[in-house]
Image (cartoon, coloured by chain):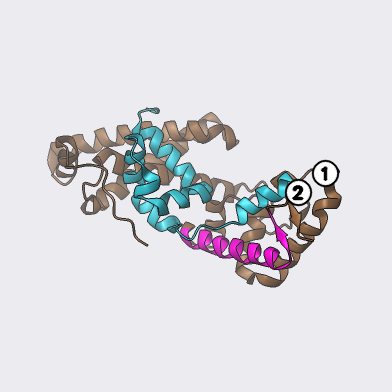
């Protein structure tokens, strides 16, 4: 039952998740770290956990990372 | 838990010059404002183009949105220059503002042009949303009935409203933020607590994801 696995992944919460406010506050730093190839899962696990679970913040992160990498403009 | 981070060892010359120029007066400031606006507009256009295919927005609407986002981001940046602490390049910090403006304006667009009723009840869409196979309905019918019971009985009215809007009806979180006069963090936290409660309720009723269904 693949649907149950997908539903369970959605319902599963990570206690390290810092929430939107803190992730948004640090997003510029996090994006530069990712662009530089830094181990962000180790250095900022709470932001990484949040971006895995929050679609809107992850969308913002993808956009900022593209900007940092010069993929837009 | 607050994570303290910095992405740079020290402030580069360009990142030091930006806030100084923007806080100055006369031609130096005007030149910096025009240059930064150009950069922000480029980022905004790139971002709306990146998101555009999923938004059902046309070319002129996308360009208007990019212009508004760049202008509003410029205002926000100049009013918050004192908050730039040199933890990243100045341009990365500034780009964050324009990305957030694009997000907020897209959320507002969907609020004005909703494709679904915000208060509609979309339980019939849930199986498709999570990829439940219609041919195996006999296996998941009880699970979804248990989930619906938990939504009705375990969640607060606010949690239920957020769950129904986002999960059942596919309302963008940023649109619900506007509808409920709230902010992204508060709506996310409400949904986070709802997810935790619902998973606990399903587990208490014997549903685990390990075996794909109810424990015997």
Question: Which label was assigned to residue B134?
Answer: 1
Quarter of image, res B197? bottom right
| Quadrant location of the C terminus of chain B in the rendered image | bottom right
Give the colour of chain B.
brown
For the magenta stretch, what is the residue range?
Answer: B185-209
- Where residue B22 appears, x then y in whole percent? 19, 43
| Secondary structure character of the magenta stretch overall | helix
Depth order, front residue of B197/B31: B197
Q: What SS does tag 2 mark?
A: helix
The earlier-in-sequence mark between 1 and 2 is 2
Residue at 57% from the left image edge and 61% from the top image edge: B191
Tell whether label 2 touches label 1 (CB within 8 Å). yes
Distance from disc 1 to disc 2, alpha carbons, whole Å, reads: 8 Å
Quarter of image, res B17? top left
Quarter of image, res B133? top right
Mark 2 surroundings: few (<14), some (14-19) or many (≥20) residues within 10 A? some
| Quadrant location of the N terminus of chain B in the rendered image | bottom left
- Where residue B44 appears, x then y in whole percent? 41, 36
Q: Which residue bears the numbered disc 2? A: B127
Q: Is residue B144 left or right of residue B198?
A: right
Residue at 42% from the left image edge and 58% from the top image edge: A18
């Amino acid at each position: 039952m693949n649907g149950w696995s997908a539903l369970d992944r959605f319902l599963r919460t990570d206690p390290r998740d810092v929430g939107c406010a803190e992730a948004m506050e640090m997003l510029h730093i996090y994006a530069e770290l990712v662009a530089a190839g830094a181990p962000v899962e180790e250095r900022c696990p709470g932001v990484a956990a949040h971006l895995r679970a929050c679609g809107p913040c992850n969308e913002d992160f993808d956009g900022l990372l593209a900007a940092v990498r010069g993929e837009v403009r | 838990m607050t994570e303290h981070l910095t992405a740079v060892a020290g402030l580069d010359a360009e990142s030091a010059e930006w806030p100084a120029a923007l806080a100055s007066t006369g031609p130096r400031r005007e030149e910096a404002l025009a240059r930064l606006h150009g950069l922000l507009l480029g980022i905004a256009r790139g971002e709306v183009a990146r998101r555009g295919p999923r938004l059902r927005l046309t070319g002129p609407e996308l360009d208007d949105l990019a212009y508004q986002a760049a202008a509003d981001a410029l205002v926000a940046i100049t009013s918050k220059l004192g908050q730039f602490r040199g933890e990243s390049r100045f341009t990365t910090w500034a780009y964050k503002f324009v990305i957030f403006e694009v997000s907020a304006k897209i959320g507002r667009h969907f609020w004005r042009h909703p494709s679904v009723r915000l208060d509609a009840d979309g339980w019939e869409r849930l199986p498709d949303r999570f990829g439940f196979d219609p041919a195996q309905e006999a296996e998941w019918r009880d699970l979804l009935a248990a989930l619906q019971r938990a939504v009705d009985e375990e969640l607060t009215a606010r949690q239920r409203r957020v769950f129904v809007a986002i999960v059942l009806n596919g309302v963008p979180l940023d649109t619900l933020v506007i509808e409920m006069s709230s902010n992204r963090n508060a709506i996310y936290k409400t949904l986070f607590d709802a997810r935790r409660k619902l998973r606990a309720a399903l587990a208490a009723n014997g549903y685990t994801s390990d075996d794909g269904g109810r424990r015997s």
